[in-house]
Amino acid sequence: MKFFYMGAFGMVGIFARYFLGVFMGRFFTVPFPCATFFINLIGSFLIGVVYVLDVEKAVLNPDVRIGVMVGLLGGFTTFSAYSLETTRLIEDSQVGFAVLYFCLSPVTGILGAFGGLYLTRSLINGGAT
């Protein structure tokens, strides 16, 4: 069953990433890759949520957890795109944006994961973390 969930959730993840990227691309016209940046932030937050629901609270079926973490979030988040976009910014002489993107993405991704852990624990534990 886990392979079914990985495939099904993976399709949802790749389509969500694509359509959110297209949607966000209409609003952000600066050289900074905003869509990938926010997609990675959202994915980091969601992996924190899934971790609490599965590992700490055992709310999720193990096959569903694998489907969500590997399929959905693996298809949704975009580290390879992050790497390529950073490289392209440097090649396009947008070094300031490249440094900003390179530094902000991992920091905000980690903050997103902490946010997902904290919020989910707070909601499940009634405000106590």
Image: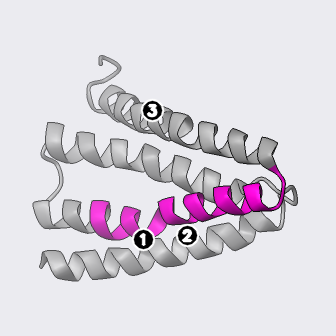
Looking at the rendered image, the quarter that the N terminus falls into is bottom left
Q: Secondary structure at mark 2?
A: helix
Q: CA distance from mark 3 to mark 2?
A: 21 Å
Taking the spot 71% from the left edge, 63% from the top edge, the residue there is 88
Q: Which residue is mark 1?
A: 75
Residue 90 part of the magenta-drawn span: yes
Earlier-in-chain disc, 1 versus 2: 2
Q: Nearer the viewer, mark 3 or mark 1?
A: 1
Residue 35 versus residue 96: which sits nearer the camera? 96
Label ID, residue 17: 2
Asked if disc 3 and disc 1 are in contact, CB closer than 8 Å, the reply is no
Q: Are marks 1 and 2 in contact (CB under 8 Å)?
A: yes
Mark 1 secondary-structure assignment: helix
Label ID, residue 32: none
* Residue 53 image point, x, y percent: 23, 44
Q: State the image quarter where residue 3 is shown.
A: bottom left
Give the residue type that dot 2 points to: Arg
| Mark 1 residue crowding within 10 angstroms, few (<14) / some (14–19) / many (20+) | many
Question: Could you tell me how far apart the alpha carbons at marks 1 and 2 are, in whole angstroms?
Answer: 7 Å
Q: Residue at the spot x=74%, y=55% of the render?
A: 90
Residue indicated by mark 3? 115
* First of labels 3, 1 by sequence position: 1
- The part of the chain drawn in magenta is 69-94
Label 3 packing within 10 angstroms: few (<14), some (14-19), many (20+): some
